[in-house]
Amino acid sequence: MELRGYVVVELQNESGHGIDLVAVKAKPAAGGLIIYLEVKSSVAGYPGQLSAAQAATPEFVKNRLERVIAQQGFYKKISPQVVDVAKLLIAEIDAGRPIGGIRADVHWLSKGPRFKVSFKQWKPVIRPRRR
């Protein structure tokens, strides 16, 4: 993602139930898409399922960003820099910047520290309503 001009930020909290990564074009005018990445991993080759909350992409994303900003629950130990990123992302979403979701499945291979990653569209691009 970084090689394609995105800035990638980790938003995961210590519970493991947050947004894993977010990628945003470094220059908003260069495409404008905000991509949320959910990472699922497995040794057995069967990565976990998305939760019911994660399936509702815009609501899930805004809810988690609001929790980061308020430093609620497992987000109490989030760094001030991540809180600032969450504030910027909420503002961008409210301004109508499109959201997309990608799921990255990591399959750990049995021999050595090797893995295979596959990507799937989590949800199609959603253009939030402007307030």
Image (spheres, helix red, strand yellow):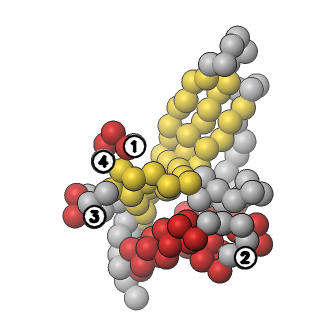
Q: Give whichever of discs 3 and 1 has the lower sequence position.
A: 1
Q: Which residue is mark 3?
A: 28
Q: Which residue is mark 1?
A: 1
SS at badge 4: loop
**Residue 29 visible, this angle:** yes
73 horizontally vs 103: left or right: right
SS at badge 2: loop
Structural distance between the alpha carbons of marks 3 and 2:
29 Å
- Mark 2 neighbour density, 10 Å: few (under 14) some (14–19) many (20 or more): few
SS at badge 1: loop
Structural distance between the alpha carbons of marks 2 and 4:
31 Å
Of residues 81 and 129, which is closer to you in this image? 81
Q: Give whichever of discs 2 and 1 has the lower sequence position.
A: 1
> Can you say which quadrant of the picture contains the N terminus?
top left
Q: Residue at x 70, y 11 (%)?
A: 111
Do callouts 1 and 4 mark residues in contact (Cβ within 8 Å)?
no
Q: Residue furthest front?
A: 80
Q: Give whichever of discs 2 and 4 has the lower sequence position.
A: 4
Q: Amino acid at mark 4?
A: Gly
Q: Is residue 15 above or below residue 42?
A: below
Structural distance between the alpha carbons of marks 3 and 4:
11 Å
Q: Is residue 15 above or below residue 78?
A: above
> Can you say which quadrant of the picture contains the C terminus?
bottom left
User: Of the numbered discs in the image, which one, if any, rests on residue 68?
Assistant: none
- Picture mark count: 4
- Mark 1 neighbour density, 10 Å: few (under 14) some (14–19) many (20 or more): few
Q: Which residue is mark 4?
A: 5
Q: Which residue is mark 2?
A: 72
Q: Residue at x 62, y 66 (%)?
A: 79
Q: Give whichever of discs 3 and 2 has the lower sequence position.
A: 3
Structural distance between the alpha carbons of marks 2 and 1:
29 Å
Task: Indicate the position of residue 30 as horizontal and vertical percent values.
Answer: 22, 58
